[in-house]
Amino acid sequence: MRTIDWNKNNNNITMIDQTLLPAEYKVIECSTIDTLCEAIKSLRVRGAPALGAAGGFGVALAAFRSNASSLDRSIDDIQDAANTIIATRPTAVNLSWGVKRVLGALEDAKNIKEVRMFALDEAKAIADEDVEKNMQLGEHGATLLEDGDTVMTHCNAGRLACVDWGTALGVIRSARAQGKDIKVISCETRPLNQGSRITTWELMEDKIPVTLITDSMSGHVMRKGMVDKVIVGADRITQDAVFNKIGTYTHSVIAKEHQVPFYVAAPVSTFDFERFEDEIEIELRKPEELKYFGNHQIAPLGVNVYNPAFDATPMENVTALITENGVFYPPFLLNEVKVHT
């Protein structure tokens, strides 16, 4: 099934609960805005493209859950819900993009029935387009991989970070579909281990060879010549930086030192070229994520903790950007990325 979808029988959102992987595969339902926001905050659903779909479906859910008797009041209820959804994760631009896109589709609605219909249609379009764009992105990115390559990746930019197929892992899937022998090195991605829990699970499900390493081993494997390319996803791309899971910047520095190509795979919806790195709020996560590993305490409870979810990789460390519109090399110009076909 898709990572996130709409349940037409119950008019609610269904999603794979990614916090349970790899031990358990479970599909959950979100029937209220509160349960959706909890799912986003707790990373039951995560990954920039998947969050775009979550934002879109969230607006549709708000439309169906509003008990307003007038069009104006219904729109007010939906806007309140939209603001709440956007605030759950401030760094990933796709979440607010998905919310705003569906809100824009409601401008021509003449009654509550049309509000619900327009919201759901637009949310479904976001989800369908995500799959299509990821497939296109994968085809473009696959041209960068050679038969026999070993690709290192960080965090999870696979089908579970999207509606389906994936961005960074989508490139690998497309290359494998072309008959190329591609192997993967997956960094565990502390502190929540999306690389070890989710990326390795996805790749093993697809029978793609994968080796798990700790984040701190990336320098060692690149220095030993064990990595041919690095491909990561992105949660937001500004004019001067790529925001992705914490640790990405470190890998980019090491890749540059060892002349390993460092690619970023992301749909155009992730681009925020109107802003710069210093203007972006980086989400800070709870200290408990570093003080505990699962239910086991691994640090003194009174220790100070700094736990940013993302870091910024300067554009000068990026070899190329892979999008649904093609592969782009520096200097990166927004108009070229958006309109090039």
Image (tube, rainbow, N blue to C red):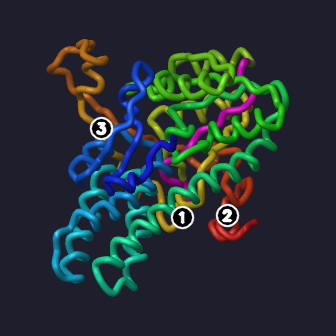
Q: Which residue is mark 3?
A: 42
Estimate the x, y position of residue 304 in percent, counting from the top left.
Answer: 21, 26
Q: Is residue 230 magenta?
A: yes
What segment is highlighted magenta in the picture?
226-240
Estimate the x, y position of residue 251 in percent, counting from the top left.
Answer: 58, 31
Secondary structure, magenta segment, majority class: loop
Vertical position of residue 291 compared to residue 246: above or below: above
Tags 1 and 2 in contact by the CB under 8 Å rule?
A: yes
Q: Earlier in the sequence, mark 2 or mark 3?
A: 3
Estimate the x, y position of residue 85 in percent, counting from the top left.
Answer: 29, 57
Pair 1/2: label in front: 2
Q: Residue at x 31, y 17 (%)?
A: 293
Q: CA distance from mark 2 to mark 3?
A: 32 Å
Q: Which residue is mark 2?
A: 337
Estimate the x, y position of residue 21 in percent, counting from the top left.
Answer: 42, 25
How many numbered badges does the structure rendering display? 3
- Amino acid at the residue labelled 3: Ser
Q: Of 4 and 138, which appears nearest the observer? A: 4
Q: Residues within 10 Å of mark 1 (few under 14, many from 20)?
A: some
Q: Residues within 10 Å of mark 2 (few under 14, many from 20)?
A: many
Extreme-front residue of the structure: 9
Q: Of 233 and 200, which appears nearest the observer? A: 200
Q: Which residue is mark 1?
A: 273
Q: CA distance from mark 1 to mark 2?
A: 10 Å
- In the shown orientation, is residue 51 left or right of residue 130? left
User: Image quarter for residue 341?
Assistant: bottom right
Q: Earlier in the sequence, mark 1 or mark 2?
A: 1
User: Image quarter for residue 80?
Assistant: bottom left
- Amino acid at the residue labelled 2: Val
